[in-house]
């Protein structure tokens, strides 16, 4: 079914209850103006943010202010962390290898204080963080102990975890050596440990493939600010995947691609070299970490007391041929054509978070999707190209066999590593990359809720001609053949006794908000985008504009990292959401508003 579109972005309220939104969007929808803002816009807020809300929404998002680096598409704002005592926000600038420290006492006008440099720091193992090292992630403990995950300049060598004082003047206090390409760090709720996802990506030419792993770092119990206590290498333990080598993997687990040696030239531990830990969340009792293994479409469970990988499980796939689970598979149909098709989707989450409901822990994933493309190896291919260049064709008896034109499935990128018939002769199933959704799971890997095709249907209604645009340029339908709006990451927060998931859409830009208080009844609340879709930054730069000038009116492009600030920690005493946008290089604060007057 083709969804009718308004021709320009607008603010709107979705008529009907939130649980019926997916159905409501398939028929004509009553649109009315929405205005709940009582705060004047600050720096970096576009004149008319896009908003689409359920009419029974209990919360809304108001962009308050933004800090802009003026750097375009160089990962100048990636991950954010907040320290309540100092009212400081820490935004990772991977492009500069540093962390930008912002005073957000006035959220409408974030002010840069200084940059925390991670290079030149002497580590506990005797190494020094060199020039060219890349800052990837930051986390801060309530007492001010902060840590930054830093990758080696060649990315395949071991990286570092740099420690600093969140209320200090920017001087690093030491470092621990961790695994290859530490991509994300978090601190356990009890503050006793830092947990690092060492992604272990291959070299760009696929000449070397280090092992993926998870570092568990025992942190100093007391932190005085000027001294981090004992920063010793024996505080670091590593959870590997060695126990799952060979035939010890669970059924359906994805290990694929060329078998490339590690940095020492060894071909041992193929599974460990293939797995790439992406993101980490920790249970409320601080005993267990759950780690997203994106390319493998899986989750690892790590026992933090033993620093041991206790379990691995595959997330399986969703069926895009079922009602409510469709997608728009083509960038050549010039319309938002969200429909059911004979394709399956691998969830492949990037961000992962956790929360408790009625005493049970649940995992929440942003199902972005990602492919392995290194050197001469490329996992994805367009459906129409299956059967060419040595690739197996679509099986003649597949329901997709008659849908290979560009306006159907021909343009859709799918994985070539899954779906082959047992004899390898043809693809009996097609698997798209990513779920174009977010999901709630039990800690046993059981799917409790998935947003289905609501992200695409909601953004079709809200963005009009900019539906499935890219982040670097405004080009409607441009990402339909890839991963659609591309949910990248998420944060979870509680407002007035209800729990909400805030999900960033990397390509479409903007934030989806769902009420997940009862995970089996999760429901859409609102979509807000602080982006002016009339501004196509890449096109403006191609026409001669300076990047900072082209970015000035664009707003937020490519949300990457999100953090929720509860009212008790907020400088305004209202809950906030901080978002780092890697393409626009902006760090933006939103107020989470409690709404009244809606039925």
Image (spheres, rainbow, N blue to C red):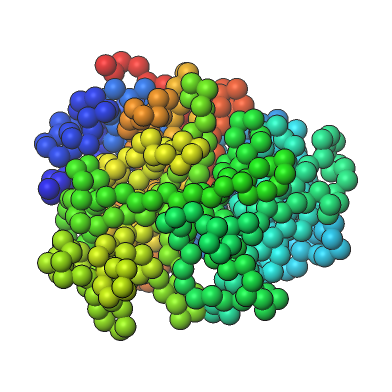
Q: Nearer the viewer, residue 444 or 333?
A: 444
Q: Residue at x 75, y 40 (%)?
A: 145
Number of marks drawn: 0
Q: Residue at x 31, y 78 (%)?
A: 391
Image position, residue 370 (x, y; %): 43, 60
Q: Is residue 443 left or right of residue 156?
A: left
Q: Residue at x 66, y 36 (%)?
A: 287
Image position, residue 513 (x, y; %): 39, 35
Work out whether residue 313 can be spotted.
yes
Q: Is residue 376 left or right of residue 278?
A: left
Image position, residue 244 (x, y; %): 58, 57
Q: Nearer the viewer, residue 11 or 428?
A: 428
Q: On screen, 486 above or below 37?
A: below
In the picture, the quarter occupied by the C terminus is top left
Image position, residue 563 (x, y; %): 54, 39
Q: Nearer the viewer, residue 153 or 448?
A: 448
Q: Quadrant of residue 500?
A: top left
Q: On screen, 3 above or below 479?
A: above
Q: Residue at x 59, y 27 (%)?
A: 570
Q: Is residue 455 left or right of residue 203?
A: left
Q: On screen, 48 above or below 378?
A: above
Work out whether residue 42 can be spotted.
no
């Amino acid at each position: 079914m083709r969804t009718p579109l308004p021709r320009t972005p607008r603010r709107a309220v979705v008529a009907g209850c939130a649980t019926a939104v997916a159905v409501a969007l398939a028929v004509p929808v009553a649109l009315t103006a929405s205005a709940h803002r009582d705060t004047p816009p600050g720096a970096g807020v576009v004149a008319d943010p896009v908003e689409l809300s359920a009419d029974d929404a209990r919360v809304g998002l108001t962009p308050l202010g933004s800090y802009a680096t003026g750097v375009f598409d160089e990962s100048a704002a990636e991950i954010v962390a907040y320290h309540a005592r100092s009212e400081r926000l820490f935004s990772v600038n991977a492009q500069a290898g540093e962390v930008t420290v912002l005073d957000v006492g006035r959220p409408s006008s974030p002010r840069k204080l200084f940059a925390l440099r991670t290079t030149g720091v002497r580590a506990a193992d005797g190494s020094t963080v060199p020039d060219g090292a890349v800052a990837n992630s930051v986390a801060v403990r309530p007492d001010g102990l902060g840590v930054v995950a830093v990758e080696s300049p060649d990315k395949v060598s071991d990286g570092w975890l740099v420690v600093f004082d969140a209320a200090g003047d920017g001087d690093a206090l030491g470092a621990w050596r961790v695994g290859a390409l530490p991509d994300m760090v978090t601190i356990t709720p009890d503050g006793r440990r830092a947990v690092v996802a060492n992604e272990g990506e291959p070299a760009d030419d696929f000449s070397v493939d280090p092992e993926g792993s998870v570092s568990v770092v025992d942190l100093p119990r007391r932190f005085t600010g000027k001294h981090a206590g004992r920063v010793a290498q024996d505080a670091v333990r590593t959870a590997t995947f060695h126990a799952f080598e060979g035939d010890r993997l669970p059924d359906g687990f994805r290990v694929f691609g060329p078998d490339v040696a590690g940095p020492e030239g060894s071909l041992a531990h193929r599974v460990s070299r293939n797995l790439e830990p992406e993101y980490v969340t920790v249970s409320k009792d601080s005993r267990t970490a759950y780690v997203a293994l994106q390319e493998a479409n899986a989750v690892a469970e790590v026992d933090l007391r033993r620093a041991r990988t206790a379990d691995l499980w595959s997330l399986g796939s969703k069926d895009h041929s079922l009602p409510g689970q469709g997608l728009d598979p083509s960038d050549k149909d010039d319309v938002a054509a969200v429909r059911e098709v004979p394709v399956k989707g691998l969830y492949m989450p990037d961000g992962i978070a956790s929360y408790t409901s009625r005493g049970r822990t649940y995992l929440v994933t942003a199902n972005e999707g990602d492919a392995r493309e290194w050197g001469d190896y490329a996992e994805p291919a367009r459906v129409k190209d299956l059967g060419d260049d040595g690739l197996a064709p679509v099986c003649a008896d597949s329901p997709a066999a008659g849908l290979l034109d560009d306006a159907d499935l021909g343009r859709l990128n799918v994985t070539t590593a899954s779906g082959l018939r047992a004899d390898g002769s043809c693809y009996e199933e097609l698997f798209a990359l990513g779920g174009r959704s977010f999901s709630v799971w039990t800690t046993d890997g059981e799917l409790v809720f998935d947003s289905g095709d609501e992200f695409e249907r909601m953004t079709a209604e809200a963005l009009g001609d900019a539906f499935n645009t890219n982040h670097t340029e405004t080009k409607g339908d441009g990402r339909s053949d890839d991963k659609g709006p591309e949910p990248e990451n998420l944060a979870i927060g509680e407002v007035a006794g209800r729990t909400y998931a805030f999900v960033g859409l990397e390509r479409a830009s903007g934030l989806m908000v769902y009420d997940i208080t009862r995970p089996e009844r999760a429901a859409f609340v609102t979509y807000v985008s602080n982006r002016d879709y009339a501004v196509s930054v890449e096109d403006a730069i191609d026409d001669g504009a300076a990047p900072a000038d082209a970015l000035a009116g664009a707003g937020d492009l490519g949300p990457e990292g999100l953090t929720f600030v509860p009212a008790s920690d907020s400088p305004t005493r209202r809950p906030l959401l901080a978002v780092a946008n890697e393409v626009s290089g902006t760090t933006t604060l939103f107020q989470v508003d409690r709404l009244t007057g809606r039925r």
